[in-house]
Image (cartoon, rainbow, N blue to C red):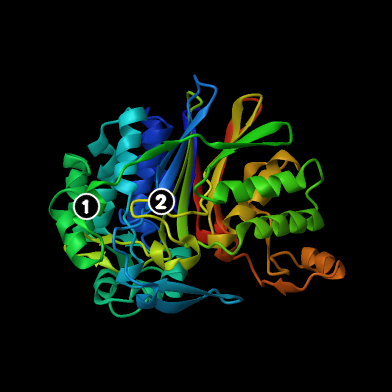
Amino acid sequence: MRGALAAGHPLTAEAGAEVLRAGGNAVDACIAAAAVSWVCESPLTGLGGGGFLVVHEAHEARARLLDFFVAVPERPDSPADLVELVVDFGDSQQIFFTGPASVAVPGVALGLWEAHGRWGSVPWPELLAPAVRLARDGVVLNEPQAYLHRILDPLLRYSPDGDALYGPGRALGAGERFAVPELADTLERLGGEGPEFLYHGDVAARLAAHVPITLEDLARYEVVERQPLATAYRGGELWTNPPPSSGGRLLAVGLEALGAAEPTPLAIARAMEAQEDARHAEDAGGTTHISAVDGDGNAASLSCSLGSASGIVVPGTGIHLNNMLGETHLTGGERPGARLRSLMAPSVWLREGEPRLVLGSAGSRRLHGALLQVVANVAARGLGVEEAVDAPRMHVEAGIVHCEDPAVADELEAAGYPVVRWRQRNLFFGGVSAVEIREDGSLAAAGDPRRGGAAVVVA
């Protein structure tokens, strides 16, 4: 097999799969898929955000992590300048904050450029070309993406920038076309020149004139390599996102709490309570994740995020900016230039030194619990990756259990937990993208149906 890729949208997955078909490696596939996601998953991800990439090279016995998450600017505005908005998931609501004061220094372009310089085998312009075409021609929204546009509409249209970017004064619906010709021009330029103009050139100047980020903030931004955090689970080892981010550690806390126990609903609930105790109410917003494995056994796990979307766009570029400084629980006196904390946890689970599961998730503060359940489903319950991702989920917060499965809700209610029963699967419970390498060497992959995800195995 030439590889497999899972992502949050069919077009994202297909862009990465096409690279694998042509002989590109897992990192090449992630870059191409990420660029397409900036168009077809634009409320969640884009050039105006940040992320993390875990890479396991087949010829090495270790993984590496590139941190290109957002950074604190020199003179961020006061939190009092943040604008509070409510997102309604249907069975639950969540408060988010936006406004120019919420924008942190983005890192995605430099991060993927650095990844390509280290591991890429396909020319950079070729990897960005599919995204250029889609941004110019437009993408027809499917129902999951229309749902995202609908629930995030107050954030997307916070400013005239967002209103101009996202259409006719209302949330776009399923079947409508979303095109971003200015982003197409920016991506075409990025393919030809690399990211220099975003951090030192004319676009950097436009960004600095539009939000409280200085040219010095942009010029000093650097990609950081970190040693992934390792934790043992079920005869294998999980490598994930290390501090200063907290998502990987919270996933490790949950797996450590499960230990050798069977992952029953009650055991999962208690492991999630351990995660919540460790989390101390940290938060994060919208995210997308791409998992890839190539025919040589290299694995790449890429998570990127805009926060919960700011509705603020760099003039003339189509670049939608993050609102990470509005995620107030992620901030707390960090020095200028420092990385914000993140709940993103791109991960690889290995057994006998070989990758067996490559995964990550969207899902705000539900993210690490979603990953906990999928890892346990595969490693402890022996489920295939598609069944593991599709299985009903739960989420424990403030002593209350949110449940997708009525039978699990009954069991936990009988154990004394207050329960919120969800009528159907919902992206509230995360959006996991995962690739499984089976013991016979064959591949399987799954994109989460909760957010319209997709996966392709390339023969």
Q: Position of residue 213 (x, y in %)?
A: 25, 61
Q: Are marks 1 and 2 in contact (CB under 8 Å)?
A: no
Looking at the rendered structure, the kind of residue marked 1 is: Glu
Q: Residue at x 47, y 63 (%)?
A: 285
Looking at the rendered structure, the kind of residue marked 2 is: Arg
Q: Nearer the viewer, residue 426 or 49?
A: 49
Reply above or below: 404 against 302. below
The residue beneath circle 2 is 339
Side of 342 relative to 424 (left or right): left
Q: Is residue 436 visible?
A: no
Q: Nearer the viewer, residue 96 or 410?
A: 96
The residue beneath circle 1 is 216
Side of 316 relative to 144 (left or right): left
Distance of label 1 from label 2 (alpha carbons): 16 Å
Question: Callout 1: helix, strand or loop?
Answer: helix
Q: Is residue 400 visible?
A: yes
Residue 362: image tag: none
Quadrant for residue 26, please give it: top left
Q: Which sits earlier in the primary sequence, circle 1 or circle 2?
A: 1
Q: Position of residue 292 (x, y in %)?
A: 48, 37
Q: Nearer the viewer, residue 30 or 231?
A: 231
